[in-house]
Every structure is written in C-alpha cells, then in structure tokens.
Amino acid sequence: MAYSDKVLDHYENPRNVGTFENEDDGVGTGMVGAPACGDVMRLQIKVNDEGVIEDACFKTYGCGSAIASSSLVTEWVKGKSLDEAGSIKNSDIAEELALPPVKIHCSVLAEDAIKAAINDYKSKHQD
Amino acid sequence: MNSLPGTDYFELFGLSPAFAIDMEQLSLRYRELQRSAHPDRFASASAQEKRISVQQAALINEAYQVLRTPLSRGRYMLARLGANIDDTDTSMEPTFLMEQMELREALAAVTASDDPFASLDSLRDRIEAMEREMVAQLQQLLDTNDTPGSDDLQRGIQLVRKMQFIQRLLGEVDELEDQLAHVG
C-alpha cells in the first residue's frame, strides 16, 4: 500500500519522540493499544499552570500510519488548552494525513491517546 | 456431503466443541475432507457440482485455519457463544499496555546488546510464557464451564485481545531473529 507524502514525512522524521517523567505533576500520560493489529501508543503532554499544553511527546510501536498519526497529534496539541486538544477528531487526523479507509483505526488510536493523556492529567488535578 | 457456510467448524471435523482440541484428529479429518472435496475429483462433474466443490474446499481450509491455532480457535468459540470482539475498541488494562510498551522497548534494544541472540532468546521465553498462561486461562474458561456467563465471556474477550498483542509481538521477535541471522 502506498503511503501519502505526509505519512512518509512523519514516519521518516517523527516529531517529538520521547518520554516525560510520569511522576511530574504537570504530565499527563495516555496509553492505548489496537488489538486488531497489536499497535501500542503512548502519548504524553506537559501542561503549564494556565492549563495550556506546553509540550508533547509520543512513542508508538506500530505501522507507519500509527506513527504518523501520533507524531501529528503531538505537533497539533502544543499551545492548545486541554479542551481544544480534547476536541481533536480522528477524522481531522485522517484527512490531514490522507489515510486510506483501512488505516482509519490508526487515527482513532491517536485520538484515543490524546484523550487518555488529558484524562490522566485531569485525574492528577481533581481536587 | 454438502455443508456450506453456516456450518459449525467443530462439527465439520467431527470434533466436540472444546478449546483443548485433538490436533491429530483435526489434521487427519482435514486431509480426508480435502481429498473428498478436491477439484480433480470433479473434473467430469457438472458446472454446479464443480462450483460446490470449490466452495467446499474453501470452507474446509478456512475452518482448519481457524481451529488450528489457540488464538483464532478461542475467538471463534467466543463468537459461537455470542461474544463478538469489537476490534475498534482501543481501551486495554493500563498495566498490560505498560508491559507491552516495555517489551517493545526491550525488543528494540536487543540489536545493540552485548549478546543479541541471548537477549532475544530470553525475551522470547518471557513472551511465550505469557502466551502459555493466557492459553491456559482461556482453556479453563471455555472448557470447564458448560454455560459461561457474561462475566466469563468478557474475561474471554479480554484474553483474546491480549493474545492478539502477544502474537504480533512474537511475529516481531521472529522478524528480528531473521535480521540478526542475516547480519551475523
């Protein structure tokens, strides 16, 4: 299957690959997996006192589309509020990367990962 | 013999529906059925009989592939009990995913380790032990209950989902072993 240029670009030069300390109070971690293909994705956000996402990183073991979807999301969420980041839809990701129908689930995984990271951050700060 | 889609795979091979399957009986019956449905035997048959024999052969192959491995057999048995697996559901136990991530990281570090083959072997042992444990749990769940309740079925679905990750991981272990063998 041919990947789009945008997928190839993110696949060959993934943005923001890495890890934040989960113990850090300002860090939210989202961990998701796709049983159908065995992909595993970890997406982390670093949130400042104003509730703005200052930094984001990811680590994905999976196909090119899964790597590109998570790479793109880390770029998109930087500078966004939690609500803004939480409203990112998998269809936005799929459209930006021109994912074929069989790879839509990779964009779903990335949407689920950012939502999980936001929920993790919120659960650390729910007092 | 004219069993077509809708046929119960266990019935097709004359097996009682159990997760702990008689592999010898399965492959024996598979070869017998394959012979009886082989297109060569229908060389002088009518077009309709030929078509049926081709469908029959495809069904036999499909059923054999499904029953042969624990993962697809478990998935099939759960579906027979009405528990279908939603592949679009991405939520998994966080501890399981954490472990998966850790295993992937360990796999990625194999090539740079002092003894890549030994590292890969110990990693494979660890993953295969996890797989055996899951297979044993699934067997316990499917074979010791006459009528598994919805809690059991949910547990079965979770096990099959985990086994899918394990299978993928073992596939990558094989791939890496191949690469190492060709470099070394």
Image (tube, coloured by chain):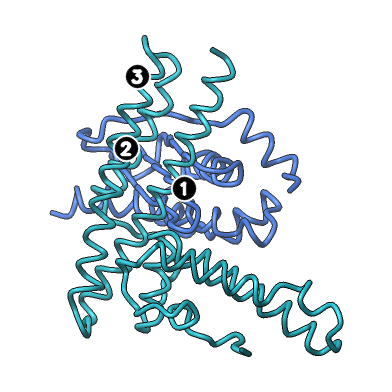
Chain colours: A blue, B cyan
Which secondary structure lies at badge 3?
A: helix
Instruction: Return the residue nearer the eye: A20 or A106.
Output: A106
Mark 2 — on which chain does it sit?
A
Q: Position of residue B32 (x, y in %)?
A: 57, 72
Which quadrant: the C terminus of chain B?
top right
The CA distance from mark 1 to mark 3 is 25 Å
Which secondary structure lies at badge 2?
A: loop
Name the mark nearer the viewer: 3 or 2: 3
The CA distance from mark 3 to mark 2 is 44 Å
Q: Residue at x 48, y 44 (%)?
A: A77
Q: Position of residue B149 (x, y in %)?
A: 21, 82
Residue lying farthest top?
Answer: B114
**Disc 3 target residue:** B118
Mark 1 — on which chain does it sit?
A
Same chain under badges 2 and 1? The reply is yes
- Residue A1 is left or right of residue B73, and the answer is right
Mark 3 — on which chain does it sit?
B
Q: Position of residue B156 (x, y in %)?
A: 28, 68
- Residue A106 is left or right of residue A99, and the answer is left
Q: Are marks 2 and 1 in contact (CB under 8 Å)?
A: no
Give residue B152's quadrant in the image. bottom left
Q: Position of residue B151 (x, y in %)?
A: 20, 76
Mark drawn on residue A48: 2
Q: Name the amino acid, label 1.
A: Asp
The CA distance from mark 2 to mark 1 is 30 Å
Q: Name the amino acid, label 2.
A: Asn
Name the mark nearer the viewer: 2 or 1: 1
Q: Residue at x 32, y 69 (%)?
A: B19
Q: Name the amino acid, label 3.
A: Ala
**Disc 1 target residue:** A39
